[in-house]
Image (tube, helix red, strand yellow):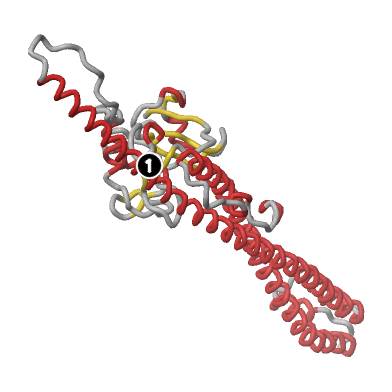
Amino acid sequence: MLALLGGATLPVALQASPASATSMPSLRQRADRLASEIQVDYAKLQVLDEAYNQARTKVLQLEEAAHEVTAGILRAARSLSGDRRRLRSVAIDAYVQGGDPGGVALLMSSKGTSAPMQQAYMNAASGNLAQAEANLRTAEHTLTDRRVVLSLDERSARAAQKRIGAARALADQITAQLESELSSIKGRLAAAVAAAEQRKQIAAEAAAQAAALARTQQVSAPKSGSPPASAPAPVGAGAGGVAVRAAESQLGVPYVWGGATPGVGFDCSGLTMWSWAQAGVSLAHGATEQYYEIAHVSMSNLQPGDLIFYGNASYLYHVVMYVGSGPYGADTVIQAETTGTNVMFTPIPPGAYGAGRP
């Protein structure tokens, strides 16, 4: 299981992150690389969690079995001590009184012992007391051997549980470091994007002013001038647009595993489920279920509100909503990413499995 971590060293993205690389393309490449590594770590953590739970269950089962065997040994020991006295008394009485086995049969019917124990009483009543005691001793030794085997199995299971726990802790540490680095890069990237948008806005305003001045200077019929400065495509007015606006209303709400409550917390599929519900579309609470209940679209034909999925055909572990315009231009999505983050805009994460339109 430790092999899942790919070694105990930190990922390359943490070992080499030159502070001088501050251009937007460089920051985006590093953010994409870190996001990809974090997604891989999330999958490892899920596998480790399941393995740890299975190991813990096995330890509890072995503890319970060992407890039952120990109790059985104590019962057998107490039974052997008392039954030895009763068997000797019955055997002597039967011998003195002429071998009448009636007392033995009466004793057996009143005790309601197991079949092997009943045979032990019959053997004692017929004079084979030594054989009866040997049978009881054999049962006790069998239980003792079983307890030894269970003890060894339990020790092995506890060791496995400890190893998996250590691997889980290390994976958590690496993931936390990756997330910290990614958060720092996202902050720098957001600042760079904001600065670029500000420059674009200033240029657009200057172009608009120049166009207005040119129009006031013309006394003839209006002429076709330069096209207006480009602006981000507006969010659509259809159901997709409603879903996007609903998701945007939850920006800053914390990630909560299994969450789907506005203002309180969302996980990835909880956010997309709730947002599309505001547009009158019902979705399941689960990335895999959502992918297979909606129409699939090409990544090159995305529209606002479309969902982008990550994973494989049998298990999709993450879903984000395409926005179409925002802090990251046409690559902007909104998502509830992971524990410790809030609902936020991000670039489209790399490695998408597919996309769909509810």
Q: Quadrant of the C terminus?
A: top left
Q: Is 142 situated left or right of 321 in this image?
A: right
Residue 316: image x %, image y %?
52, 39
Q: Residue at 71% across / 63% down in the picture? A: 160
Camera sees residue 94: yes
Q: Look at label 1 and name its amino acid.
A: Val
Residue 157: image x %, image y %?
71, 64
Figure check: 83 above or below 168? below
Residue 185: image x %, image y %?
47, 50
Residue 324 found in image quarter: top left
Residue 123 found in image quarter: bottom right
Q: Is 26 situated left or right of 154 in this image?
A: left
Q: Quadrant of the N terminus?
A: bottom right
Give the labeled residue for mark 1.
193
Residue 101: image x %, image y %?
83, 79
Figure check: 24 above or below 13? above
Q: Is 261 situated left or right of 185 in this image?
A: left
In the current view of this chain or complex, which residue is farthest to the left?
Answer: 219
Q: Residues within 10 Å of mark 1 (few under 14, many from 20)?
A: some
Figure check: 119 above or below 336? below
